[in-house]
Amino acid sequence: MTPQKKLYLAIIVLVTLAVLRETGILNLNYYKTKINTNAQVTWFSSAKTRAAQYSKRVANHRNTDLSIVILLDNDTIYKEVNKRPPVLMKLHSSYGRSLWRPLYKSTSFTAAGSMSSDDANEKLTSSEYASKSHLFGELTINGDITISGLCSHRQAIQVVKNVIAGKAVDELKRYLSSLQ
């Protein structure tokens, strides 16, 4: 085999591996991440009393009974459904488009939206609804992420979504535990 044929064969193999990895057919990921996040939660003033009532209702149950559903840009990125009616977080995200680069990816991201709880299965009059405990607030998560190593674009986006979901769940649980 001539050196020119060896070079063509090597290029074909590398391109094939890259295409398979980026499409998700072949999972070749070996990377390190460096993440910096912060979150800001704003509970509406009328919701703070209700949040305390909700927390007391949740306190009567185990912490594992809390249900949480997080939607990020119409994708469910976190779902934990237990005995309690779910706290629904609807977030919209934006992040830099540099997650496609090979070997080194670095970007800033923001996810912002609202969260609320509602006992949707209960039939309530308006006065009963006002006295029930519901949560309503806004959540903003900002962060920077650096990924170095072999990580596909698809996997990098999934890492960002997992970071956002983890931070949102942590903030919600921290807030509810501070009310007890």
Image (cartoon, helix red, strand yellow):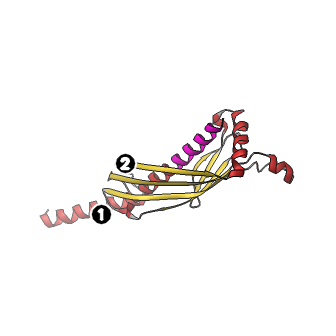
Task: Give amino acid for label 2.
Answer: Thr
* CA separation in Å, label 2 and label 1: 25 Å
Confirm whether residue 5 shows in the render.
yes
Q: Label 2: few (<14), some or many (≥20) within 10 Å?
A: some
Q: Quick one: quadrant of the C terminus? A: top right
Where is residue 60 shown, x and y percent of the image?
A: 72, 32
Q: Is residue 38 left or right of residue 174?
A: left
**Residue that badge 1 annotates:** 15
Which residue occupies the extreme front position in the image?
Answer: 45
Q: Is residue 175 magenta?
A: yes
Confirm whether residue 2 shows in the render.
no
Count the marks: 2
Nearer mark to the viewer, of 2 and 1 = 2
Task: Give amino acid for label 1.
Answer: Val
**Residue that badge 2 annotates:** 33
- What's the residue at 69%, 39% (across, down)? 55
- Please give the range of residues in magenta: 165-180
Disc sitting over residue 105 in the figure: none
